[in-house]
Image (tube, rainbow, N blue to C red):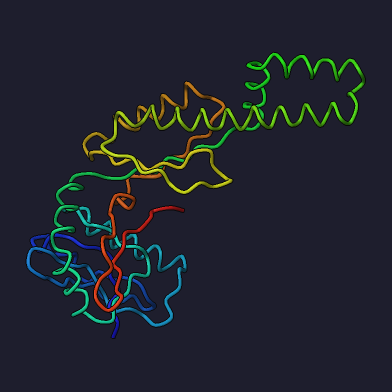
Amino acid sequence: MSTYVYGITASSHPALPEGMGGVGDPPRPVRVLKEGELAAVVSDAPEGLRPKRRDLLAHQNVLSEAGAARCVLPMRFGSVAPDDGTVTGVLAERADHYKERLRTLDGKVEYNVKAVHNEEAVLHRVMSENPEIRAMTEANRQAGGGSYEQRLQLGEMVVAAVKAREAEDATEVQSALEPVAEAVSVGPESTGWLANVSFLVERDSAETFLAAAEQVRKVHPHLDLRINGPLPPYSFVEPGPSGPAGTTLGADTGEE
């Protein structure tokens, strides 16, 4: 039977709630494998596991329950090892790496911040900031809309100005929140967001971080700021070298 791995923690971690269920239908019982100073939160792996909503939520719930008492390094959904022995072997092989990560991330949570422009508001801002665009808009209006070439030129200018504003706003969002975070991890670029950044925050400082995010909203009303958290520190668990027999117990990205 293959072993499904939810996360890695210290072997001294308090016992998990009685009867906790994990992925699968019916849910597989969650258990703990210990190896020296480390432990892995695992269950038997169901066959044909796919990232369905039910199982994604089960994975997250196990991490939330286990992480409520003490730091747990979250693994990506679908981390499966051939058997229990392979998991404990990986723990032994990478003991120094995992212990260092547990020490560093203890008492910390992750907040993922995504930002997108309010289209109408950002166009208004671009117009107000760019006299050349305003002048060409007015000239086209007086000319009954302007020629095709003039309209095309105006459109290209607006697109360029919006892209420049996107880059500036992404930098400003990160710069405003970085001072109230312990670490920052920039997510992959996406056409849907101008900023996708994860921040590592002391659990006790969460209110300060959220207050800073709210201030960003007030200062930049043309931005739609979306905050997801507190989360396990998905973006701050480096997977380290690959394990024996091709096993990789890697970190979850935490991205949606």
Could you tell me residue 92's position as x and y percent? 13, 69
Please give the name of the residue rendered at 53% of the width and 25% of the height, measured from the top-left corner: 221
Please give the name of the residue rendered at 25% of the width and 69% of the height, measured from the top-left corner: 20
Left or right: 255 with respect to 9? Answer: right
Return the residue found at the far bottom: 1
Nearer to the camera, 149 or 203: 149
Could you tell me residue 80's position as x and y percent? 32, 74
Eyeballing the image, is 135 above or below 5?
above
Eyeballing the image, is 143 above or below 26?
above
Left or right: 140 with respect to 53? Answer: right
Please give the name of the residue rendered at 40% of the width and 44% of the height, measured from the top-left corner: 228
Please give the name of the residue rendered at 39% of the width and 82% of the height, measured from the top-left corner: 47
Residue 78: quarter of image: bottom left
Could you tell me residue 252's position as x and y percent? 35, 58
Nearer to the camera, 24 or 232: 232
Eyeballing the image, is 91 above or below 253?
below
Nearer to the camera, 46 or 168: 168
Residue 44: quarter of image: bottom left
Residue 139: quarter of image: top right
Which image quarter holds the N terminus? Answer: bottom left
Number of residue marks: 0
Eyeballing the image, is 45 above or below 199?
below
Could you tell me residue 112's position as x and y percent? 39, 43
